[in-house]
Image (cartoon, helix red, strand yellow):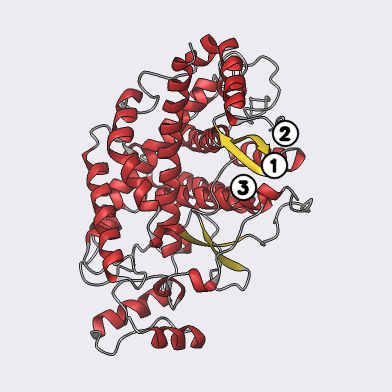
Amino acid sequence: MSRGARRAGAGQGAAVAVQLLVTLSFLPSVVEAQVTGVLDDCLCDIDSIDNFNTFKIFPKIKKLQERDYFRYYKVNLKRPCPFWAEDGHCSIKDCHVEPCPESKIPVGIKAGSSNKYSKVANNTKELEDCEQANKLGAINSTLSNQSKEAFIDWARYDDSQDHFCELDDERSPAAQYVDLLLNPERYTGYKGSSAWRVWNSIYEENCFKPRSVYRPLNPLAPSRGESFYTWLEGLCLEKRVFYKLISGLHASINLHLCANYLLEETWGKPSWGPNMKEFKRRFDPVETKGEGPRRLKNLYFLYLIELRALSKVAPYFERSIVDLYTGNGEEDANTKTLLLNIFQDTKSFPMHFDEKSMFAGDKKGAKSLKEEFRLHFKNISRIMDCVGCDKCRLWGKLQTQGLGTALKILFSEKEIQKLPENSPSKGFQLTRQEIVALLNAFGRLSTSIRELQNFKVLLQHSR
């Protein structure tokens, strides 16, 4: 990625005019990059996803991300890279993440346990006392024994064997709350060997490929002419899915950067917007040797996977025992109503991916493959601590954890079906960190698909 020219004294209108002139020079090839038709490994067509996302999901998920419960994410951006000596964090100002002051965090989020099953006392002093004592949470003495046991179950429960991600320790002094609305994902200027090494490690060391394939898996690596996707079609479904998930995540992140690019900076006032030239470089079929449209198809595939997970986990949140607790009763009730409304939409989608086709072989082989799948993805989540740009690291960790949570859900269907109405299940639980990551990660995918439509409209209007 390049920072691009910063034209001092030029107005935003001039920048837009230049962008449109540049667009005209490659209009035909970019239009070709708009993918259509049926996705591989499922029976869903792209037009149906576009319409469903635009008219049902995107407006609601955008509102949900603005709610207090989902806008504050606790993350440790200071964990050392476990795989190589870090080159140091980039000094570009747009890489900086501004942590949220303690006074701004809703009292119900920052106090006590991160896993809220039922309402706790709305007593600030009690919450503060409990936080200082480092106990489970402010448990009102009027709560039933059943509710108290729920908190204890949370404290004792360890489902690390089900995790697809390396989770941050929220109790670490280095873990801080970040307001996601004030630290949006966009182009930062982070590039070079550090960024290359992260993606190269993800593709080359953690994606599956046959031993007979010698070309790099990294889609940005130079090719010797071998078709990148020929070998993929020869892999089993599970390994194809794994690669498509990573490729889809990569495409989504790149779309965010193209859509929120630093177009100019005049007198210290940056102007962010869609960069057509950058979009072409990453997705145009000519410039990418035909791979750009496949990357975009993988984005849609990833969207379907996470959409399926949301529809599967709905019963978990539909129980009265689960509250999205911040301390503001009216806010919390409205947030849960909106979330349940989104779940109803996800369940109404008629062409879901069928995850039951995965790991469906003999029990021993299927179990081994699932564990390999889980460990590969968990390793990728650890690589996120090697990202040198703090803002890129923040959103990389969040989106990776969101996808990992989606996978955990898809492979826990039986446990979710057995959930008791008024007490937590020892077989399946989600932390607040996982819940926030899950919905925000899906929100980023929804935004990516919406931005893709925006690029298409911009191209059409520029004719």
Q: Position of residue 450 (x, y in %)?
A: 41, 33
Mark 3 highlights which residue? 392
Asked whether residue 334 is in view, the answer is: yes
The number of numbered badges drawn on the structure is: 3
Query: Which residue is drawn at the image coordinates 25% and 72% (left, top)?
Result: 423
Mark 2 highlights which residue? 8
Q: Amino acid at mark 3?
A: Cys
Q: Position of residue 357 (x, y in %)?
A: 34, 36
Disc 3 vs disc 1: Cβ atoms closer than 8 Å?
Answer: no
Q: Position of residue 109 (x, y in %)?
A: 42, 70
The earlier-in-sequence mark between 2 and 1 is: 2
Q: Secondary structure at mark 2?
A: loop
**In the visual, does 331 lie left or right of 344?**
right
Work out whether 188 lies above or below 231: below
Q: Nearer the viewer, residue 27 or 79?
A: 27
* Disc assigned to residue 267: 1
Disc 2 vs disc 1: Cβ atoms closer than 8 Å?
Answer: yes
**In the visual, does 270 lie left or right of 132?**
right
Q: Amino acid at mark 1?
A: Trp
Report how far apart the C-alphas of labels 3 and 1 lie in the structure: 26 Å
Q: Nearer the viewer, mark 3 or mark 1?
A: 1
